[in-house]
Every structure is written in C-alpha cells, then in structure tokens.
Image (spheres, helix red, strand yellow):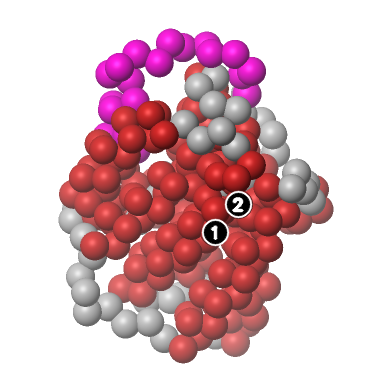
Amino acid sequence: MSENALILLIIFMPIVAFLYASVGHGGASSYITLLTLAGIASAQVKPTALILNMAVSAIAFAFYYKASNFNWRLFIMLAVFSIPASYFGGKITVNETLYRQILGVLLLFPIARFLNLLPISDTVKVKQLIWLPPILGLSIGLISGMIGIGGGIILSPVLLLLGWTNLKQTSALSALFIFVNSFAGLVAKPTHFSISNEVYLLMLLALLGGILGAYMGAKKFDNKVLKVLLTVVLVVASLKLIIQ
C-alpha cells in the first residue's frame, strides 16, 4: 500500500464508520471498497471488513437499542434464516470482476440513504405476512455472505419502505442484524488470514469513529457536510467498481 493510499484511508475510514454507525450500520461495503481500491490484499479485505462490521454494529446497537422500541419478533424471524444463509454465502467464491460490480451496485444503497432519496413510510404499506421476513432474511443473508457484508444496507431501506419499523427501530434492528450476519460470514472464512499493522491502525480509527457516530446518531445528530463528503467518495468508488 502506498503512502498516499494510507493517508486517504486514515482520513476516510473513521468518517465512514462515523456515518454508518450514526444510522445503525456497520459499513462493511465501504470498508471493502476503500481497502480494495487502496491495494490491500484481498485475503485481508473481507475478514477486516467483517471484524470492523461486528465492532461498529455492536456499538450502534448498544446506543440505538436504548433509544428505540426494539422489535424482537421481527428480528428473530429475519435472523433465523439470514444467519445460515450468510454462512453458506461466505463459502461461495465469486468471480473477482462480478464481485466488484455487485459491490459497486450495493454502494448505491448507502448513497441513497445519505441523500435521503429512499422512501420512508410512517404507516405499514405491506402487511407483515408470516413468510415475508424469512424470505427477506434468507435472500439478504446469502448476498451478504457472498460479498462479505452484514446486509444492513439492503435491509434498512426495505424495512422503511414497507413501513414495518420507524427510523430508530430500523437502526437498532439493522445493527444487530449486521452483527449476527457478519459473525456468520466471518466463521465461514479461512482461519489462517493475517492482518498487517497498517490495517490494525485503520481498524482502531474506524472503531473510534463508530463509537462517536453511534452516540451522536442516537442523539439525533445530522452532519450534512460529512454526509455529502462521504456520498461523493462512495459515488466515485461505486462507478469505478462497476466500470472496471
């Protein structure tokens, strides 16, 4: 990794963690993107992103759980199916080009979230039929495991669109959903991966950013400047991944 790439990562990793944690997400999709574009070895990227995802999402859950009326019934219906799906998805090897393109498309979800482009319903738009949460959990879990993310960037907009949870409930539920799926995906990875000293530093910075972001997000903090900055970075990264 070049010196310039390391400097950019030192700047953007804590910002990414801060903003994702502020909306109850872990940020794995963006960690993977930044680390990949910086030239970090692929063997380090996914495990690093999943470990960070678990840490940041756990912190976000701790703050948002206190600030929301957590829907345990919905979470269990999603997680029971997403956890095994994420594990088996983690065992699937995806073509590198296809992997980058899927990741680039998935980045469009947080971009839309940060720009407030995703519709949010205050009332239930689709009845929570008994078979819908399991299908959502299964499909999101499988995609999450294959790509090496927790699935919150997909789950959150779906929950808000369906009107099943409000903003605070969505953040809390997504955070725990991300944690359990990230753990399942990490378990599916080989245990002999190594992490360099530079990556350990980036993980520490991201963790600190996540703690601050989760605290501020649960307190209704909204930093538009940082969101615009991260959105620009994600748009460029998304286009680069899709085009390549």
Q: Is residue 157 above or below residue 226?
A: above
Marks 2,1: beta carbons within 8 A: yes
Can residue 45 be seen here? The reply is no
Horizontally, residue 32 falls left or right of residue 67, namely left
Q: In this view, does 194 lie above or below 118?
A: below
Q: Which residue is drawn at 23% across and 43% down?
A: 85
Horizontally, residue 221 falls left or right of residue 134, namely right
Q: Which residue is drawn at 54% across and 26% down?
A: 165
Q: What is the x, y in percent for residue 15?
A: 67, 63
Q: Residue at x 43, y 11 (%)?
A: 127
Return the mark for residue 59. 1
Q: Which residue has dot 2 on it?
A: 63
Query: Disc 2 to disc 1, how far (Cα)?
Result: 7 Å
| Residue type highlighted by circle 2 | Phe
Q: What is the x, y in percent for residue 146?
A: 28, 50
Horizontally, residue 49 falls left or right of residue 225, namely left
Using a 10 Å C-alpha cutoff, classify the residue at mark 2 as few (fewer than 14 neighbours), some (14 to 19) or many (20 or more). Answer: many
Label 2 residue SS:
helix
Image: magenta residue range: 120-140
